[in-house]
Image (cartoon, rainbow, N blue to C red):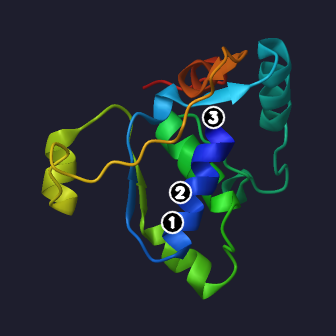
Protein backbone atom coordinates (compact mmCIF):
# COMPACT_ATOMS: atom_id res chain seq x y z
CA UNK A 1 0.00 0.00 0.00
CA UNK A 2 1.46 3.33 -1.06
CA UNK A 3 0.31 5.31 1.97
CA UNK A 4 1.58 2.79 4.50
CA UNK A 5 4.98 2.55 2.84
CA UNK A 6 5.31 6.34 2.60
CA UNK A 7 4.30 6.79 6.24
CA UNK A 8 6.78 4.15 7.38
CA UNK A 9 9.59 5.73 5.33
CA UNK A 10 8.79 9.25 6.55
CA UNK A 11 8.86 8.10 10.17
CA UNK A 12 12.22 6.35 9.74
CA UNK A 13 13.69 9.39 7.96
CA UNK A 14 12.51 11.72 10.75
CA UNK A 15 14.38 9.51 13.21
CA UNK A 16 17.58 10.21 11.25
CA UNK A 17 17.93 6.95 9.35
CA UNK A 18 18.84 6.77 5.67
CA UNK A 19 16.08 4.95 3.82
CA UNK A 20 16.28 3.34 0.39
CA UNK A 21 13.05 2.13 -1.21
CA UNK A 22 13.26 -0.33 -4.10
CA UNK A 23 10.55 -1.64 -6.44
CA UNK A 24 8.51 1.56 -6.18
CA UNK A 25 6.45 0.62 -9.23
CA UNK A 26 4.91 -2.32 -7.35
CA UNK A 27 3.30 -0.14 -4.66
CA UNK A 28 -0.47 -0.50 -4.60
CA UNK A 29 -3.12 2.20 -4.32
CA UNK A 30 -6.30 0.68 -2.97
CA UNK A 31 -9.74 1.48 -4.29
CA UNK A 32 -11.73 1.33 -7.47
CA UNK A 33 -9.46 1.55 -10.51
CA UNK A 34 -11.69 3.94 -12.46
CA UNK A 35 -12.09 6.24 -9.46
CA UNK A 36 -8.31 6.43 -8.91
CA UNK A 37 -7.70 7.17 -12.60
CA UNK A 38 -10.42 9.83 -12.63
CA UNK A 39 -8.97 11.53 -9.56
CA UNK A 40 -5.43 11.55 -10.98
CA UNK A 41 -6.68 12.85 -14.33
CA UNK A 42 -8.44 15.70 -12.50
CA UNK A 43 -5.16 16.61 -10.78
CA UNK A 44 -3.50 17.00 -14.18
CA UNK A 45 -6.02 19.71 -15.09
CA UNK A 46 -4.68 21.97 -12.31
CA UNK A 47 -2.31 24.40 -14.01
CA UNK A 48 -0.81 27.81 -13.44
CA UNK A 49 -2.13 29.72 -16.43
CA UNK A 50 -0.16 32.85 -15.53
CA UNK A 51 3.26 31.23 -15.68
CA UNK A 52 3.43 27.49 -16.37
CA UNK A 53 7.14 27.42 -15.42
CA UNK A 54 6.19 27.97 -11.78
CA UNK A 55 4.21 24.77 -11.49
CA UNK A 56 2.44 22.79 -10.23
CA UNK A 57 4.53 19.96 -11.57
CA UNK A 58 3.02 16.47 -11.74
CA UNK A 59 5.27 13.46 -11.36
CA UNK A 60 4.73 10.73 -13.92
CA UNK A 61 7.40 8.19 -12.95
CA UNK A 62 6.66 5.75 -10.09
CA UNK A 63 9.86 6.52 -8.17
CA UNK A 64 9.32 10.28 -8.39
CA UNK A 65 5.61 9.87 -7.55
CA UNK A 66 6.40 7.88 -4.42
CA UNK A 67 9.14 10.33 -3.37
CA UNK A 68 6.65 13.19 -3.71
CA UNK A 69 4.13 11.26 -1.59
CA UNK A 70 6.78 10.79 1.10
CA UNK A 71 7.54 14.52 0.98
CA UNK A 72 3.87 15.20 1.67
CA UNK A 73 4.17 13.27 4.95
CA UNK A 74 7.16 15.28 6.19
CA UNK A 75 7.21 18.79 7.70
CA UNK A 76 8.69 20.15 4.47
CA UNK A 77 8.69 23.83 5.48
CA UNK A 78 10.98 23.16 8.44
CA UNK A 79 14.66 22.39 8.38
CA UNK A 80 14.26 18.97 10.01
CA UNK A 81 11.72 17.94 7.36
CA UNK A 82 14.03 18.90 4.52
CA UNK A 83 16.92 17.10 6.21
CA UNK A 84 14.79 13.97 6.60
CA UNK A 85 13.71 14.16 2.96
CA UNK A 86 17.33 14.29 1.82
CA UNK A 87 17.88 10.89 3.50
CA UNK A 88 15.22 9.19 1.37
CA UNK A 89 16.01 7.54 -1.96
CA UNK A 90 13.44 5.72 -4.09
CA UNK A 91 14.26 3.41 -7.01
CA UNK A 92 12.29 1.52 -9.62
CA UNK A 93 13.28 -2.12 -9.73
CA UNK A 94 16.24 -3.33 -7.72
CA UNK A 95 19.38 -1.62 -9.10
CA UNK A 96 22.03 -3.34 -6.96
CA UNK A 97 24.98 -1.81 -8.84
CA UNK A 98 23.70 1.75 -8.53
CA UNK A 99 22.93 1.35 -4.83
CA UNK A 100 26.39 -0.11 -4.27
CA UNK A 101 28.02 2.76 -6.13
CA UNK A 102 26.02 5.64 -4.58
CA UNK A 103 25.38 4.37 -1.05
CA UNK A 104 28.03 1.66 -0.63
CA UNK A 105 25.38 -0.84 0.45
CA UNK A 106 25.28 -4.46 -0.69
CA UNK A 107 21.63 -5.48 -1.07
CA UNK A 108 22.49 -9.09 -0.32
CA UNK A 109 23.86 -8.24 3.13
CA UNK A 110 21.77 -5.17 3.96
CA UNK A 111 19.10 -5.03 6.64
CA UNK A 112 15.85 -5.11 4.69
CA UNK A 113 12.61 -4.25 6.43
CA UNK A 114 9.48 -5.46 4.74
CA UNK A 115 6.13 -3.84 5.30
CA UNK A 116 3.60 -6.51 6.34
CA UNK A 117 1.31 -7.23 3.43
CA UNK A 118 -2.42 -7.60 3.68
CA UNK A 119 -3.82 -11.06 4.22
CA UNK A 120 -6.65 -10.70 1.73
CA UNK A 121 -6.66 -9.66 -1.91
CA UNK A 122 -7.08 -5.89 -2.19
CA UNK A 123 -8.66 -4.12 -5.13
CA UNK A 124 -6.52 -1.38 -6.50
CA UNK A 125 -3.99 -0.28 -9.02
CA UNK A 126 -0.19 -0.44 -8.96
CA UNK A 127 1.84 2.73 -9.18
CA UNK A 128 3.23 1.57 -12.52
CA UNK A 129 -0.26 1.31 -14.05
CA UNK A 130 -1.25 4.69 -12.64
CA UNK A 131 1.85 6.46 -13.95
CA UNK A 132 1.45 4.90 -17.40
CA UNK A 133 -2.16 6.11 -17.45
CA UNK A 134 -1.23 9.72 -16.69
CA UNK A 135 1.44 9.73 -19.40
CA UNK A 136 4.61 8.40 -17.83
CA UNK A 137 7.23 7.00 -20.18
CA UNK A 138 9.79 4.92 -18.36
Q: Quadrant of the N terminus?
A: top right
Seen from the viewer's position, the closer of residues 8 and 70 is 8
Which percent across, then down, holds residue 104?
15, 60
Q: Which residue is mark 1?
A: 12
Q: Residue at x 85, y 29 (%)?
A: 39
Local secondary structure at mark 3: loop
Q: Are the residues at dot 1 and dot 2 in contact (C-beta closer than 8 Å)?
A: yes
Residue drawn at x 49%, y 26% is 26
Task: Farthest residue to the bottom: give it.
Answer: 79
User: Callout 2: helix, strand or loop?
Assistant: helix
Residue 1, numbered label: 3
Instruction: Locate residue 67 relative to residue 4 in the image: left or right.
Output: left
Residues packed near mark 2 inside 10 Å, few (<14), some (14 to 19) or many (20 plus): many
Give the spatial CA distance, label 3 vs label 2: 12 Å
The answer to whether mark 3 and mark 2 are in CB contact below 8 A is no
In the picture as drawn, the residue positioned furthest to the front comes out as: 119
Label 1 to label 2: alpha-carbon separation: 5 Å
Pointer 2: what residue? 9
- Seen in the picture, residue 46 relative to 104 is either above or below; the reply is above
Amino acid sequence: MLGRVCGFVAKKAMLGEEVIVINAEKALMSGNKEMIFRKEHAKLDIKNLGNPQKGPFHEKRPDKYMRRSIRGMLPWHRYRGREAFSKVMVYMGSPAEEIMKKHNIDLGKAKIEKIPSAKKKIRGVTLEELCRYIGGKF
